[in-house]
Amino acid sequence: MPASAPVISRFPVPKLADLPDDVRSRIEAVQEKSGFIPNVFLVLAHRPEEFRAFMAYHDALMDKPGGLTKAEREMIVVATSAANQCQYCVLAHGAILRIRAKNPLIADQIAINYRKADITVKQRTMLDFAMQVALQSATVGDADLARLEAAGFSRDDVWDIAAIAAFFAMSNRMANVTAMRPNDEFYKLGR
């Protein structure tokens, strides 16, 4: 008897064929590019309107040009997701970070303790602020922004750091509530 597929969510997971055309097309495009469907797509597709909004904001934050590199954006996700104990996001975005940074060690270092990771002082300053936004946003003050600007970040960069940390704090919570299971493929990517 073959083993059953692992459960990827506490909530219903729609069949690809049953999804609206635009949602299905987006998922199929990711599958074609990566060779598998990341479980986050299937879990969030349970509510197509929210899937569309989530993906639009994700893309606006993570895929745009700016002062932060794509690897630095992923560093924010990995560090804050680890602090929020989000297994899915640490593993999925850790894989993306390893690929974007071309470094098989960096994601594990950042997830465990970014303060000891092989990153620049500027990146450590970025992650200090991202952690503050993710865990203690009410404490953010003018001195925090001044520290980031002194490290070389523009106000637009500061906004991006804050928005990524805040967005993924929400994502971490939904991944934890749904018990979103990371795909096995993520463990090996970029190693």
Image (cartoon, grey):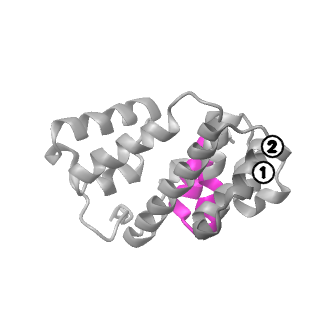
Pointer 1 residue: 147
**Residue 135 in sight here:** no
Q: Is residue 66 above or below residue 107?
A: above
Residue stretch in magenta: 77-96
Q: Is residue 36 above or below residue 124?
A: above
Residue 55 point in image, percent of width and height: 36, 43
Say whether residue 84 is magenta: yes
Density class for disc 2 (Cα within 10 Å; few <14, some 14-19, many ≥20) is: few
Q: Quadrant of the C terminus?
A: top right
Q: Is most of the magenta stretch helix, strand or loop?
A: helix
Q: How far apart, in angstroms, are the residues tagged by discs 2 and 1? A: 5 Å
Pointer 2 residue: 150
Say whether residue 22 is magenta: no
Q: Secondary structure at mark 2?
A: helix
- Image quadrant of residue 111? bottom right
Tag 1: amino acid: Arg
Q: Tell me what residue is drawn at x 44 percent, y 37 percent.
A: 60
- Residue 24 shown left or right of residue 29 in the figure: left
Are the residues flagged by discs 2 and 1 in contact, CB closer than 8 Å?
yes
Q: Tell me what residue is drawn at x 39 percent, y 64 percent.
A: 6
- Residue 183 shown left or right of residue 103 in the figure: left
- Image quadrant of residue 56? top left
